[in-house]
Amino acid sequence: MTRRRNVNGGGYVDVDMPSEPEDLTATNVTKTSCTLCWNAPQNDGGSSVTRYYVEMYNEQSGWIRINETPAAECWTDIDGLLEGAENEFRVCAVNEGGVGPPSESTFVIWTPGELNKPNCAPSSTSELSVMSAVFIIRELKAFKESMIVYLSMVMY
């Protein structure tokens, strides 16, 4: 918690860090880029959010900051990703109180090659890639949760 001068009169106001941004998703997925979108934190900590930090997970370095986005925008384009790599992202909100906790992370699984366009919907290969990635992400999360429950039962 930090203190700042009250702009409406004497004294000071306590300011906390903002809570985590919500509903982080990846859209417009290609082999080497994506767009991340999120919702502002429910609690700004008593001070307006001034910017967001976007972080990416790297197995050698852990979480690294890759981008800074103005607070007016709850989205950012990520370019230069390696084709065929799995990337994990999260976002932190920043205000006068400091850097808040990160959002839940999102996994994006890149399609390693070109897809054949089907004769029916979806209307583009990039849309199909997003649909495939979302399906794979949901399946992986469900598998991870079921394995935790199963292992807990076995260990008991």
Image (tube, helix red, strand yellow):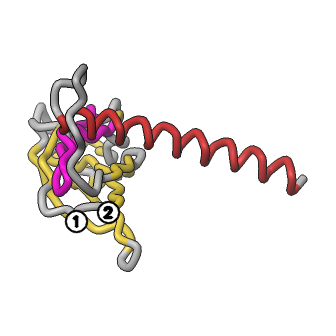
In which image quadrant can residue 67 be found? bottom left
**In this orientation, does residue 119 appear?**
yes
State how many labels appear. Answer: 2
Q: Which residue is at the front of the view, 87 or 93? A: 87
Q: Position of residue 153 (x, y in %)?
A: 85, 47
Q: Is residue 121 above or below residue 100?
A: above
Identify the residue at image location x=68%, y=42%.
146
In which image quadrant can residue 136 be found? top left
34 in magenta: yes
Q: Position of residue 89 (x, y in %)?
A: 32, 54
Identify the residue at image location x=20%, y=49%.
114
Identify the residue at image location x=29%, y=68%.
64
Q: Is residue 112 left or right of residue 72?
A: right
Outermost residue, right side: 156
The part of the chain drawn in magenta is 24-40
Kind of residue at disc 1: Leu
Crowd rating for badge 1 (residues with CA inside 10 Å; few <14, some 14–19, many 20+)? few
Q: Which residue is at the front of the view, 108 or 103? A: 108
Find the distance from the CA under tag 2 to the CA under tag 1. Answer: 6 Å
Name the residue tied to disc 2: 85
Q: Which residue is at the front of the view, 33 or 22? A: 33
Name the residue tied to disc 1: 82
User: Element type at marker 1?
Assistant: loop
Identify the residue at image location x=24%, y=44%.
115
Q: Which residue is at the front of the view, 27 or 64? A: 27
**In this orientation, does residue 10 appear?**
no
Kind of residue at disc 2: Ala
User: Dots 2 and 1: beta carbons under 8 Å?
Assistant: yes
